């Protein structure tokens, strides 16, 4: 399309080759791709252009340029690239767009308000306490990968809050489902970054395609079974006084009221979406936070002092403590600044639109690099350091409102933020009440990668624990 390439010609970017565009940059080990992209974005002025094969991305990495992308309906359509997520998530809230997304988002948002998700507090606490007990066997031993343990606790509390399922992954019953959901993330990521895997007619003959089918069958089969069981026991409207209602039961409640809300298949797509959006995000954030607190004991000491004052070291954390853990919240925010679980988001312009004095043609792909915005030296005092003081009230006031967007923002912003903060705080407080964390090295030594979400390059979160009290 002429207007698209005219626009590209006006923008800075790396040298372009026929057919491949700039995608030859990805001709390297998969784990190096993330670093290459983020370095490239840092090198060129924002907005820049990037041709992934014949597909053009206009990439923004400055806070003052992105407001319209978050706030305007012209950019509320997810890019085509999300179609690889749709094999699993269908038209669920993350990958869906258009009138169905709009309606579903309106109907489902109340489910994730703080007053509704507080009912899951005891469920999260229960599984976190199991985690804390299991970790006892690691006291004073060499380093181990904390993510392995947190992931099991996370999947158990997500299964119970979302589905009412008592999965007991922490008890060792690690099932095929967990393996397949991880595989699904990897397969989606591979297709997104490799243009040659995006050609359906070729992909259909590949080994990855077989693996994708297998993952799809296991994942959908898992949720289908739970849905059938829940439908049998689902108590219909008029029983709103029931004190505990899973998200799935509440989705069925919506369907009781609004018949065309979702078919069984669409409910399954919502569940896959909510499951993957909540489980690995909370697990990653908690794992990063514990490793960083292990690397930087002075900050850990401050967090521990706050926990001692607000909750104490022996009593369980309670609902009323959640809003009083100011310093812990600064630490979590700083972790999500350095390691935004979702480093890039991509939208498709659904009409020709003016953006930062550029005329963006209809159907262009516009990408926001949350990762680069979060490390912009003009906005952050110590962009590449772990420095929770970035979130002191005075520092926040001096920054652009879009300098910090780990949950995206605006129309397509995350609806799970209150659930995420609640779960992360319960887990971190419970672990830190009982254990002192130690981790080797420093932030600069640990390179990053992204496979669907940001990770340390070696994909492990090693630390040691000692008794705190
Ligand atoms: C630290 C934790 C989390 C982070 C950093 C995070 C981040 C994000 C980001 C960046 C997006 C936008 C994605 C995009 O535009 O492609 C998003 C969307 C979304 N998140 Fe989260 N999220 C977190 C936890 C959760 C949880 C716990 C839930 C559910 C309980 C959740 C549910 C969703 C949903 C449904 C959307 C799609 C919203 C829409 O487009 O209408 N997230 N999240």
Image (cartoon, rainbow, N blue to C red):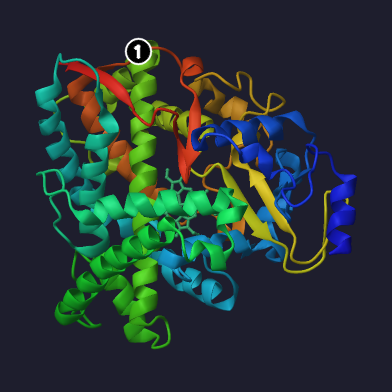
Q: In this view, does 111 lie to the left or right of 413?
A: left
Q: Nearer the viewer, residue 207 or 328?
A: 207
| Residue 44 x/y as whole percent | 78, 33
User: In the figure, 15 relative to 297: above or below?
Assistant: below
Question: SS for tag 1?
Answer: loop
According to the picture, the residue beneath numbered tag 1 turns out to be 440
In the image as oriented, which residue stretches furthest toward the bottom?
259
Quadrant assignment for the N terminus: bottom right
Residue at horizontal 53%, vertical 42%? Answer: 406
Disc 1 beta carbon < 8 A from ligand 1?
no
Q: In which quarter of the view is residue 325 placed?
A: top left
Q: In which quarter of the view is residue 269 placed?
A: bottom left
| Residue 275 x/y as whole percent | 34, 57
User: In the figure, 306 relative to 115: above or below?
Assistant: above
Quadrant assignment for the C terminus: top left
Residue at horizontal 74%, vertical 29%? Answer: 43
Could you tell me how many numbered marks the image carries?
1
- Is residue 94 in sight in this rendering? no
User: In the figure, 447 relative to 374: above or below?
Assistant: above
- Is residue 4 in sight in this rendering? yes
Q: In this view, does 83 lie to the left or right of 139?
A: right
| Residue 254 x/y as whole percent | 36, 78
| Residue 267 x/y as whole percent | 35, 74
Q: Is residue 304 left or right of residue 79?
A: left
User: In the figure, 115 relative to 99: above or below?
Assistant: above
Residue at horizontal 22%, vertical 29%? Answer: 431
Label 1, residues with CA under 10 Å away: few <14, some 14-19, many ≥20: some
Q: Which of 258 and 79 is in front in this view?
A: 79
């Amino acid at each position: 399309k002429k207007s698209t390439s005219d626009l590209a010609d006006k923008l800075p970017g790396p040298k372009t080759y026929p057919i491949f565009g700039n995608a030859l940059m990805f001709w390297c080990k998969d784990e190096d791709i993330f670093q290459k992209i983020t370095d490239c974005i840092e090198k060129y002025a924002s907005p820049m252009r990037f041709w992934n094969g014949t597909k053009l991305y206009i990439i923004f990495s400055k806070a003052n340029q992105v407001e319209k992308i978050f706030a305007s309906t012209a950019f509320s359509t997810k890019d085509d690239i999300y179609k690889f997520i749709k094999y699993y998530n269908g038209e669920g809230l993350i990958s869906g767009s258009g009138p169905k997304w709009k309606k579903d988002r309106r109907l489902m948002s109340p489910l994730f308000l703080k007053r509704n998700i507080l009912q899951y507090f005891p469920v999260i606490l229960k599984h976190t306490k199991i985690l804390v007990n299991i970790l006892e066997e690691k006291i004073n031993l060499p380093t181990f990968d904390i993510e392995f343990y947190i992931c099991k606790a996370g999947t158990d509390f997500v299964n119970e809050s979302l589905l009412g399922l008592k999965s007991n992954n922490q008890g060792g019953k690690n099932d095929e489902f967990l393996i397949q959901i991880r595989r699904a993330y990897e397969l989606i990521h591979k297709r997104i970054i490799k243009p040659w895997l995006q050609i359906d007619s070729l992909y259909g003959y590949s080994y990855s395609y077989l693996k994708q089918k297998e993952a799809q069958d296991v994942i959908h089969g898992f949720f289908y079974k739970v849905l059938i069981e829940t439908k049998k026991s689902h108590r219909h409207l008029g029983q709103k006084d029931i004190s505990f209602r899973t998200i799935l039961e509440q989705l069925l409640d919506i369907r009781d009221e609004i018949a065309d809300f979702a078919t069984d298949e669409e409910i399954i797509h919502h569940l896959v979406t909510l499951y993957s959006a909540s489980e690995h995000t909370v697990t990653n954030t908690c794992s990063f936070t514990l490793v960083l607190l292990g690397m930087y004991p002075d900050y850990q000491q401050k967090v521990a002092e706050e926990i001692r004052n607000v909750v104490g070291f022996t009593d369980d954390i309670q609902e009323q403590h959640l809003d009083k853990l100011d310093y812990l919240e600064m630490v979590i925010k700083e972790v999500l600044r350095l390691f935004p679980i979702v480093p890039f988001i991509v939208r498709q312009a659904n009409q020709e639109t003016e953006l930062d004095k550029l005329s963006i043609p209809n159907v262009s792909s516009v990408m926001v690099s949350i990762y680069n915005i979060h490390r912009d030296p003009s906005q952050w005092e110590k962009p590449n350091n772990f420095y929770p003081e970035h979130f002191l009230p005075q520092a926040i006031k001096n920054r652009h409102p879009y300098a910090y967007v780990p949950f995206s923002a605006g129309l397509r912003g995350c609806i799970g933020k209150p659930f995420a903060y609640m779960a992360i705080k319960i887990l971190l407080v419970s672990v830190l009440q009982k254990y002192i964390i130690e981790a080797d090295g420093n932030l600069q030594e640990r390179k990053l990668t992204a496979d669907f979400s940001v990770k340390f390059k070696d994909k492990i979160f090693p630390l040691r624990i000692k008794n705190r009290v």
